[in-house]
């Protein structure tokens, strides 16, 4: 499995959340289909939001990937330098509106379209890639312990100067 750029991993997880949220619980396919159709129509007309996830949402059910290995390689660099290369790795040839949408986003928003295509690919092919483990357990394993010196006196206990700041009796102690 290949590691992908953290932003692509994040966008793929966000897309999954958007799709699940739109489907609802219990799943309502009619609402989902209406949402996707509205997005496809907007992007096909050259409009639509300049948002990676919305564009990926519009693409995800219509797009077909012709070069999966190439898309995994592209997923390692979020700010890729050649959107045309990614455009050649996928298509939306299933219907006329899908073709129109694909052509419009590739022409009007090439960088965003590149990112949306890769995001849709990662969402649909989750077994082909892995994300950096950002869990608290993993972060603690990588901790070098540089927070051992919590205060100036090195005891880890707050001194009188600090505690007096919060003492409503003006620093007087019993």
Image: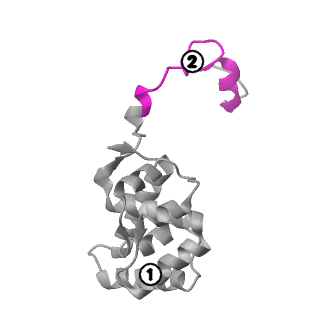
Position of 27 with respect to 49 (left or right) is left
- For the C terminus, give its image quadrant: top right
Coordinates of residue 163 in the picture (x, y in percent): 65, 25
Magenta-tinted stretch: 139-166
- Say above or below: 113 vs 158: below
> Who is closer to the viewer here, 165 or 27?
27
State how far apart marks 2 and 1 are (Cα). Answer: 66 Å
| Above-or-below relation of 123 to 62 | above
Q: Nearer the viewer, mark 2 or mark 1?
A: 1
Answer above or below: position of 84 versus 41. Answer: above
Q: Nearer the viewer, residue 50 or 105?
A: 105
Please give left or right for residue 100 compared with residue 93 in the image.
right
Disc number for residue 99: 1
Image point (70%, 20%), residue name: 161
Q: Tell which circle, 2 or 1, labels the residue nearer the N-terminal end.
A: 1
Label ID, residue 157:
2
Give percent across and percent down for residue 137: 37, 33
Q: Secondary structure at mark 2?
A: loop
> In the image, residue 132 lies at what x, y percent?
41, 41
Classify 10 Å Cα crowding around label 2: few (below 14), some (14-19), many (20 and above).
Answer: few
Query: Please, what secondary structure does the residue beneath circle 1 have?
Result: helix
Give the camera-side residue of 5 and 22: 5
Residue neighbourhood size for the residue with mark 1, other residues' Cα within 10 Å, grouped as few (<14), some (14–19), many (≥20): some
Which label belongs to residue 160? none
Residue 75 is at least partly visible in this image: no
Q: Residue at x 50, y 20 (%)?
A: 145
Q: Is residue 38 magenta?
A: no
């Amino acid at each position: 499995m290949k590691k992908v750029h953290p932003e692509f991993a994040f966008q793929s997880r966000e897309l999954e959340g958007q799709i699940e949220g739109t489907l609802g619980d219990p799943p309502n396919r009619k609402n989902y289909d209406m949402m996707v159709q509205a997005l496809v129509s907007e992007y096909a007309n050259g409009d639509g939001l300049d948002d990676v996830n919305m564009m990926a949402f519009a693409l995800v059910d219509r797009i077909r990937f012709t070069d999966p290995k190439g898309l995994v390689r592209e997923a390692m660099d979020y700010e890729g330098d050649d959107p045309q290369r990614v455009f050649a790795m996928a298509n939306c040839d299933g219907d006329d509106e899908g073709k129109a949408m694909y052509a419009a986003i590739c022409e009007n928003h090439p960088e965003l379209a590149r990112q949306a295509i890769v995001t849709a690919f990662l969402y649909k092919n989750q077994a082909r890639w892995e994300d950096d483990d950002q869990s608290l357990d993993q972060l603690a394993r990588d901790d070098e312990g540089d927070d051992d010196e919590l205060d100036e006196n090195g005891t880890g206990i707050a001194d009188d100067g600090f505690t007096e700041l919060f003492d409503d009796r003006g620093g007087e102690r019993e």
